[in-house]
Image (tube, rainbow, N blue to C red):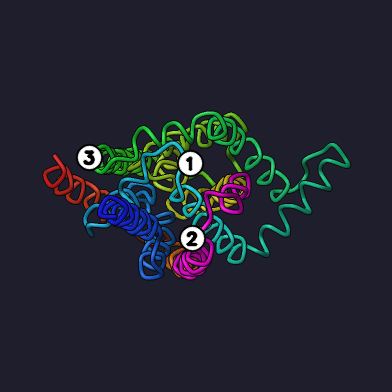
Amino acid sequence: MTSVYHLAHFVLLAQTKSAGLAHQSKVTFFQAVVLGVLQGVTELFPVSSLGHTVVFPALFGWHNLVASESKPESFWLAFVVALHVGTALALVVFFWREWKSIIGGLLHSARTRTVTTPTERLGWLLVVATIPAGITGLLFEHPLRVLFSKPLAASIFLTVNGVILFGGEAARRRAEIRERKGHLPSRELKTLDYQEAGVIGTAQVLALFAGISRSGITIVAGLIRGLNYEDAARFSFLLATPVILLAGLFKLPDLLGPLGDGVRTQALAGAAAAFVAALVSVRFLTRYFKTRTLWPFGLYCLVAGTVFIIRFA
């Protein structure tokens, strides 16, 4: 009788522990909203959304999320899909009129097999720039995310991101000097050729490393090609829209499948928070880059990255 009692007690403890672990594996609504806002802001600000979603749970002591980030399969990856879709939808809403013209221009250009307007040309530039990141993302996004989704690695890459932003600033300064001397005319977005668009799109591949900003690397690539801050940022945000949206939709089955069990409602809350935060961010940044530069973001990445390295080393 005593043996049966001890066995029943053992089973009860095991079930309680298992239930506790299952509960810990879920994302709370508070965490979902915080991470949604973080994603919506840092995806568009040139400071790396992936890097921050890796580092901040570790800073907050959300150990269940930290443990899930580097697993090959986990609820975390399914949850992040929703945040990306929310961010992408905000970009679609903000640039709705422009995307309507671009898609119409692409359809007309495909029918007539000509490129006659700046809008049609911009559309094909975006298509060319999307291809490298799309292909590379499909092949390597998951293994790289699993390999480098660790706080220390993300902190190091965040510091590297700061160096990249300062490099873009230096390139833009040299271009401005040449413009003032009359050696090089100021470039407009419509003057980009398809090879240059491909280079800018290829630069997005670096954003697969947690800590390297997608918007930051593409803005820098645009500045190096001679664009001003406003056009470089506009092209970056337009380019991010199909890349983020298609990547999110491609992985949506993860959220709808077993990996999404227990986190779908939280993911919806996080996506809504990401949508609002991204909409506010893109509105702010499109105005900011009319007169401002990358310096504050570069400085933030260097300082924050260094502090995080010390914290997680």
Residue 185 circle label: 1
For disc 1, the neighbor class at 10 Å (few under 14, some 14 to 19, many from 20) is few
SS state under label 2 = loop
Vertical comparison of 77 with 282: above or below: above
Q: Position of residue 189 (x, y in %)?
A: 56, 46
Q: Position of residue 69 (x, y in %)?
A: 37, 45
252 in magenta: yes
**The magenta stretch spans which residues?**
249-278
Residue located beneath label 3 in the image: 152
* In the displayed structure image, the side of residue 221 where residue 152 appears, left or right: left
What whole-number distance in Å separates the C-alpha atoms at marks 2 and 1?
A: 53 Å
Please count the marks in the image: 3
* In the displayed structure image, the side of residue 233 where residue 251 appears, left or right: right
| Tag 2: amino acid | Val
Q: Pointer 3 and pointer 1: residues touching (CB < 8 Å)? A: no
| Tag 3: amino acid | Leu
Quick one: which residue is furthest to the right in this view?
Answer: 112
For disc 2, the neighbor class at 10 Å (few under 14, some 14 to 19, many from 20) is many
Q: Which residue is pictured at 45% across the width and 40% down the height?
A: 226
What whole-number distance in Å separates the C-alpha atoms at marks 3 and 2?
A: 27 Å
Mark 3 or mark 2, which has the lower sequence index? 3
SS state under label 1 = loop
Mark 2 or mark 1, which has the lower sequence index? 1
Q: Position of residue 306 (x, y in %)?
A: 15, 45
Q: Which residue is pictured at 61% across the width and 61% down the height?
A: 92
SS state under label 3 = helix
